[in-house]
Amino acid sequence: MNSKIKLLAISGSQREHGNCYLLAKTILDSVKVDYEIIQLAEKEIKFCNLCGKCINNGCILKDDFNQILKEMKKADGIIFVIPRYVFFSSKFLCFLERLDIIGHFRRHRGYKITFTNPDYRLFSEKPSCILAISGEGKIEKETLKITADYIKGLGVKLILHDLPPYLGVSIKGGADKGEVLKNKKGIKESKKLIEKLINSIKK
């Protein structure tokens, strides 16, 4: 699809082409935008070592993080598609930490300097939203809240859903691959949030 709008979906699942990926692809295929889906399951994301060298440059760790961050900056809007594990997918949590720690070091200019840098956020009001998939249970409100707090700290503009839990769409996806596609109501509500995201970009 040739469009002026480019969306990036980040699948936080540790399972390739699982329900997070399938939900994102199904919805994005139904709207008139260009899009890319990045599956963290396919990427190498190392743990931050708190070296602080990201204050002035990109992260020095040799993995896929910097390329993902580059794609996030190029996109007009970002969709975070997260699964419910015990609490978080560990790779997604590691990815959020890597994003957040750059902002932390740039904000405080490292450990020893105490002033706050006002221009520390990675993004400037870039519209973003959250789709959260559970298995048989429900997405914990705390999981959505922590995710929302992390990504808002990056400087993005979080687009809220019109129905509870508001911070994102909570979808019962089942345990088996493809089971989420049976949840027509969840797909419908997810599409509504994506369309709201697109409308915020057009404005």
Image (cartoon, helix red, strand yellow):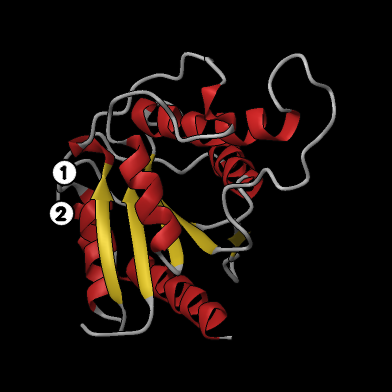
Residue drawn where x is 34% and y is 51% of the image: 10
Between residue 38 and residue 60, name the one nearer to us: 60
Q: Residue 25: x and y, percent? A: 22, 64
Q: Which residue is mark 2?
A: 178
Q: Which amino acid, mark 1?
A: Asp
Is 32 located above or below residue 144 in the figure? below
Query: Are the two marked residues, 2 and 1, in contact with CB atoms closer than 8 angstroms?
Result: yes
Q: In which quarter of the view is residue 100 placed?
A: top right
Q: Residue furthest right?
A: 115
Is residue 133 visible from the viewing direction of this image?
A: no
Q: Which amino acid, mark 2?
A: Gly
Which image quarter is the C terminus in?
bottom right
Q: Residue 86: x and y, percent? A: 40, 26
Q: How many dots with numbers?
A: 2
Q: Which mark is residue 36?
A: none
Is residue 111 visible from the viewing direction of this image?
A: yes
Helix, strand or loop for disc 2: loop
Q: Residue furthest front?
A: 56
Please state if 169 lies on the left or on the right of 17 as rendered.
Answer: right
Q: In which quarter of the view is residue 91 placed?
A: top left
Residue drawn where x is 33% and y is 68% of the image: 187
Q: Which mark is residue 176?
A: 1
